[in-house]
Amino acid sequence: MAAPRVVEHGPLRWDHLRTVARTDLKQLVQARDYWIPMMILGGIFFVFVPTVLLLTITQIGNVGAVEQLSQALEILPQNAQEQIKGDSESGRAAYALAVYLFAPVAVVVPITISTAVGAATIVGERERGTGEFLAHSPAGIREIFYGKLAASLVPGYLTTIVGFGIYALIVNTIVGPDVGGWFFPTPQWWVLMLWVVPPFLALTLSLVLRLSAKVKSTAAAQQASALVSLPLIMVAYSQATGSLYGGASLAWYVGAAAWVLAVLALWRGVRSVTRARLLGVADEQ
Amino acid sequence: MEPAPVIELDGVAKWFGPNPGLTDLHLRAASGRITVLLGPNGAGKTTAIRMITGAFSPDGGSVRVFGLDPARDGAEVRSRCGVVSAKPSLYDRLSGWDNLRYSAELHGLGRGPEVDQRIAEAAERFGIEAALDGQVGSYSTGMKTRLALARSVLHRPELLLYDEPTSGLDPESSHAVLELIREMTADGSTVVMCTHLLLEAEGLADQVVVMQDGTDVVSGSPGDLTRRYWPHDVVRIGAEDPTGLDALARATGVLAYERTDGGATLHLDDPGRVPDLVAALAAAGVRVTRVVPHEPTLEDLYFAVRQTAGHSRLGAVEGSEV
């Protein structure tokens, strides 16, 4: 005979949610062994690689490599080709790289960082024994779940937004003079960053947190999360790229679909967390 | 008059897959009293605590805390409880301040100078105020326990649930923690404490509940239980030649006699018979070395209860075989 699943009702207390999220973030800030590698990851994708590539293209002139790259741009959709700016071969190549090639970066970085945080968040409470404190606290299960989701989402998205800002500066500084001034972010990039990336992040995290609630160790959570996030990164990659190629309207549709899926996944995801699981008891229900 | 019960558990059962956590637990904890759950590992003490806060829901029986059902009104029940578990459940990467602020916020105290003042007072009460700025990961076990105790009283709960709070502490720290727990009932708090260390419960418990295999074997005040298991006064007598004491087995007023190393244990119908017995021994030439009234300890009680429970269980098995 099993106890009926206890569904916690009542309004969502935002103060509890904020407290859980803030405390988790505070712990993350203390964990330099975590955030230093993540900063390096963001730095490589948003600063180092684009700087080297764009400088190389804009500084070496119209040599063979740039000409080949320019020819390769012809495989882009007509809509995308029409938007490419620049008078020279190198300028057009650099513009295309800046606007189209690095789109996946905006998805890979936040999902990678947030998955790493989210995978450990619930199983970590259990492993450290702090799940006992949360289980006996007045905080509701939904407040704990969404608080932890926010604490996992913020580092990834914040790194991405900051990285995006730095990337915009680099791109405009290096490529801008060849294409008639500052051009980045383009309207599609704004939609991508503010409308398409967040739901993909939330969707991934809802799955990762469910895994974190169910597995027995942080190591297992990270293994399983990698398996879940990889296909999602590929889907997000293709959708992000398509959003940029297809114009702003397509990006709006992609984002809307992702939001619907994310909301459904988050709504379902809450059920994976129980007080028994915070206590490390899997067979209660 | 007995105060109203804060906790009422009736026939509570809890299963973890095929394994029983609780089978038939009955527990009443009166307001403003210290109830000690005694039992070996696996008796169900921790599960009982988790039932009380609503962290677990029962598979059978009923749980009422403050007159509420923790499975339905868990948020309110938990907001009125302070819990310290066997592992202190502290965030090692945070400072003592941050750990206490986290709890204060989840209990609806908010943030600000007034809350900080309350945190400082709680920390001072448990002698941990000087370490509040340090990361909890650098604390000793004793400091962590003190911090967990300070956290448990921060929101001034009506019910304190302590699950082996002295686990891993040295004797001095254990003694200090138990003193602090004793003090808390002076504020009107109700305390339920789990332990398998009998010395901890000695002198602390207003009510003892001995648990075994997920059920309460016996419960009552230590005095009542002692009288139940030792209804007569017990005296231990020593003699240079213990064989000379055997004559007491037939003496008037001696209800039971048992020879032990270097002496004998006597169960008497009246303690006033001791002078006559000693005089009789002296007249018979027996040189008495000591006469000590025996006060059964909680340890004696515990083993007497366990022995009785074991015998009754054995009897039931034998009966079923027949």
Image: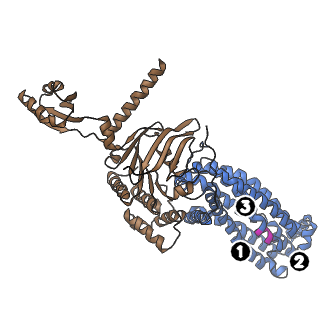
Chain colours: A blue, B brown
Q: Amino acid at mark 1?
A: Ile
Question: Going 45% across and 44% down the picture, which residue do you hit?
Answer: B27
x and y percent of residue A224 in the render? 68, 49
| Residue at mark 3: chain | A
Q: Work out how far the residue at label 2 is from the one at label 1, CA to CA, in angstroms.
A: 25 Å
Front label number (2 vs 1)? 1
What segment carries the magenta color? A189-194
x and y percent of residue A149 in the render? 65, 60
Front label number (2 vs 3)? 3
Q: Which residue is mark 3?
A: A201
Q: Residue furthest right?
A: A78
Does any portion of residue A62 appear in the rendered image?
Answer: no
In the picture shown, does residue B121 fall above or below B212? Answer: below
Whether residue B80 sits left or right of residue B180 in the image: it is right
Q: Is residue B217 magenta?
A: no
Whether residue A153 sits left or right of residue A56 in the image: it is left
Q: Amino acid at mark 2?
A: Ser
Say what secondary structure mark 3 lies in. helix
Q: Amino acid at mark 3?
A: Leu
Question: Going 53% across and 37% down the picture, which residue do you hit?
Answer: B20
Q: Work out how far the residue at label 1 is from the one at label 3, CA to CA, in angstroms.
A: 21 Å
